[in-house]
């Protein structure tokens, strides 16, 4: 570029002298919007102008603005403490009352540590073997040695395709203590979906943290579908534990926007949710968080220097209620159950849902759709993330 723009220059308002005459007035207007604090509107207009003109100075400015937007979204969220419902563990009425009031249940020390440690060991063995984390004595700490790997990338799936085969992962959804809790919460006919999910979250990439969202658009079926989120080690807020927007399950299905984090979708939190409190906790091994599929939740940023955050989440429903067929498939649907079950020691938890009674309902794609312009935004956010990641790595 002969006008000497670099991405660093793009952190400041566009130098109008570097623009063709016809772009100066509209660019100046947009910069004025941004200067007045109308950041979202400014970015949206800048995107239109940059994309329609293809001007390289405006494109750089757009990416810089996206990076600023990502940084702003990183402003630490003030969390209030989650209500600890452990005292009600054996009291279905009390559990159900709290859940329908708050939209979540947080319980300490529910799952025996041994089952969690065993699964963690199997996962970290695979991650060390795949070159994601340090092996040897330090393996259990899950210290990242590679750049963040993300859902959708070839290298991500190389490890995930091995982890999703683990009998210990899928069996954990049927753990006696967990099932006893779930029966108290959802009733005697409760069963887990076989869609067991494992989260492999790198440090040093806060922009990729799972954004605020509801599970309903992903899973659909019954809105009483209840997720159990379980870390595979102590997981303080600073290491990326899950946070919940208390009472947010009472506002129906929220609109979606693109986000770089897991699922690539965030819920748009309108004014009606403005008075709600975000709640969180420093999780200990064995603790469980439950929430129904309309509750807004997000991952806190994993701010640790090197530790990955490893966790699992399972979803439970009552017999006789609705589900969509995707919930009966392995996560990402890359491998068949037949393939996954090869090498398992027990057949007990294989195809168990085929003996359950549920109503299969069609998937409604409209509930999961992103706005039509999201490809452009996805690309721009990706560029912005790389910019920030490289700047951090250099620092
Ligand atoms: O662990 C995460 O980052 C996301 C978990 C989540 O969204 C869920 O369990 O529904
Ligand atoms: Fe979720």
Image (cartoon, helix red, strand yellow):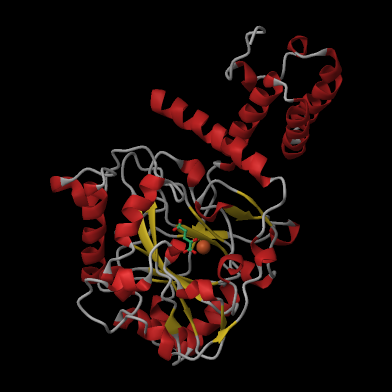
Quarter of the rendering containing residue 25: top right
Q: Is residue 104 above or below residue 276?
A: below
Residue at the (39%, 82%) spot, across then down: 181
Q: Is residue 315 above or below residue 258?
A: below
Q: Is residue 230 left or right of residue 39?
A: left
Q: Quadrant of the N terminus?
A: top right
Q: How many marks?
A: 0
- Front residue of 274/128: it is 128
Residue 270 spot, x, y in % from top left: 72, 57
Q: Does residue 283 appear in this view?
A: yes
- Front residue of 269/16: it is 16
Residue at the (38%, 43%) spot, across then down: 203
Q: Is residue 229 left or right of residue 38?
A: left
Residue 41 spot, x, y in % from top left: 77, 38
Quarter of the rendering containing residue 22: top right
Q: Is residue 28 above or below residue 79?
A: above
Q: Does residue 201 appear in this view?
A: no
- Front residue of 314/280: it is 314
Residue at the (64%, 62%) spot, across then down: 368
Q: Quadrant of the C terminus?
A: top left
Residue at the (41%, 68%) spot, across then down: 330
Q: Is residue 360 left or right of residue 165?
A: right
Q: Is residue 300 left or right of residue 140?
A: right
Residue 99 spot, x, y in % from top left: 54, 77
Residue 193 spot, x, y in % from top left: 44, 77
């Amino acid at each position: 570029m002969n006008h000497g723009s670099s991405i660093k220059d793009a952190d400041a308002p566009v130098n109008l002298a570097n623009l063709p005459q016809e772009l100066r007035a509209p660019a100046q207007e947009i910069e004025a919007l941004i200067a007045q604090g109308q950041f979202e509107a400014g970015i949206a207009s800048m995107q239109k102008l940059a994309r329609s003109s293809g001007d390289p100075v405006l494109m750089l400015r757009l990416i810089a603005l996206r990076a600023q937007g990502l940084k702003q979204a990183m402003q630490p969220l003030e969390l209030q403490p989650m209500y600890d419902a452990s005292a009600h563990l054996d009291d279905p009425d009390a559990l159900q009352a709290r859940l329908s009031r708050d939209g979540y249940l947080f319980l300490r020390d529910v799952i025996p540590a041994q089952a969690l440690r065993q699964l963690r060991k199997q996962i970290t063995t695979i991650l060390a073997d795949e070159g994601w984390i340090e092996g040897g004595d330090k393996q259990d700490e899950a210290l990242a040695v590679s750049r963040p790997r993300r859902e959708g990338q070839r290298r991500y799936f190389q490890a995930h395709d091995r982890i999703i085969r683990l009998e210990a992962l899928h069996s954990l959804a049927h753990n006696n203590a967990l099932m006893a809790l779930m029966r108290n919460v959802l009733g005697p006919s409760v069963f887990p979906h076989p869609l067991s999910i494992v989260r492999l979250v790198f440090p040093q990439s806060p922009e990729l943290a799972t954004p605020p969202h509801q599970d309903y658009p992903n899973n659909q079926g019954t809105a009483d579908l209840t997720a159990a989120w379980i870390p595979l080690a102590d997981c303080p807020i600073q290491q990326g534990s899950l946070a919940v927007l208390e009472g947010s399950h009472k506002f129906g299905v929220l609109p979606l926007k693109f986000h770089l984090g897991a699922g690539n979708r965030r819920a748009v939190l309108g004014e009606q949710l403005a008075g709600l409190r975000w709640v969180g906790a420093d999780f200990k091994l064995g603790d469980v968080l439950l929430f129904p599929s309309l509750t807004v939740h997000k991952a806190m940023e994993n701010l640790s220097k090197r530790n990955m955050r490893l966790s699992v989440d399972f979803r439970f429903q009552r017999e006789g209620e609705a589900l969509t067929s995707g919930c009966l498939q392995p996560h990402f649907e890359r491998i068949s159950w037949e393939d996954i079950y090869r090498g398992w020691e027990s057949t007990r938890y294989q195809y168990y849902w085929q003996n359950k009674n549920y109503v299969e309902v069609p998937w409604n794609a409209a509930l999961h759709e992103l706005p039509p312009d999201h490809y452009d935004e996805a690309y721009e956010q990706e560029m912005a993330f790389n910019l920030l990641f490289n700047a951090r790595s250099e620092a």
